[in-house]
Amino acid sequence: MSIKDKIINYNNKMKGNTKLIAVSKTKPIENVQEAYDAGQRLFGENKALEMRDKYLALPKDIRWHFIGHLQTNKIKYIAPFVELIHSVDSLNLLTQINKEAIKNNRVIDCLLQIDIAHEETKFGLDDDSAKELLESEEFSQLKNIRICGLMGIGSITDDKSKTRQEFKHLKELFNCFKEKYFADCDYFSEISMGMSDDFEIAIEEGATYIRIGSSIFGARDYVSKN
């Protein structure tokens, strides 16, 4: 099946407000262009320099989402154009994003990454740390970022009930934060969760963004570019 056919197939599986992010990390520009030609406009990358290079080379109506662990010294490369940063896992990172947003005369949309899997290889805030961030004086001073929702990465497991419980918890935390901190904020509306192996569960549990990569573009060729 071609990239075009896979894009169409996955988009047909999206329900309600759920949107497909085609995760193009490590894949060549030609592959991204093929997905674009099939109508895809949302793309996800996890390396700032790779995202910048693709942004420069590809059509400017692509909406670029940063989904990986973001180093503070790399924010400047994506700050002029990134649509949404999914992976905010500290107040320090949020503060640095705010600084780069000011330099670019922008408000940058972000998601708080929540550690729902509790695996050593994954990043993210625990529930209490996320609450402390949102209630902090420092956060209240950040005027060039917007928290638009939450992101989570499920466990690597064949236990679908465990995956469902993790996604359900993220949705419950989203609802709690919406009521407590963002009741009057229409923009707090996004839940990013679910990938190739668990996207159907994620959709059922309320995901608004699904991140699909290798199932569209094939096995990844990892490179050192950051």
Image: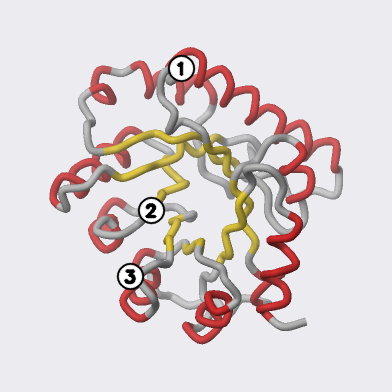
Mark 1 or 3, closer to the camera: 1
22 in relation to 65, above or below:
below
Residue 4, image x, y percentages: 66, 78
The reply to whether dot 1 and dot 3 touch (C-beta < 8 Å) is no
7 in relation to 177, above or below:
below
- Find residue 55 and report its image quarter: bottom left
Q: CA distance from mark 1 to mark 3?
A: 34 Å
Residue occupying image coordinates x 40% and y 42%: 110
Viewed as shown, does residue 37 lie left or right of 188?
A: right
206 in relation to 192, above or below:
above
Residue 119, image x, y percentages: 64, 42
For mark 3, what is the residue? 52
Residue 83, image x, y percentages: 38, 53
Q: Classify mark 3: residues with Cα within 10 Å, few (<14), some (14-19) or many (20+).
A: some
Residue occupying image coordinates x 47% and y 83%: 29
Q: Amino acid at mark 1?
A: Ala
Mark 2 or 3, closer to the camera: 2
For mark 2, what is the residue? 83
For mark 1, what is the residue? 183
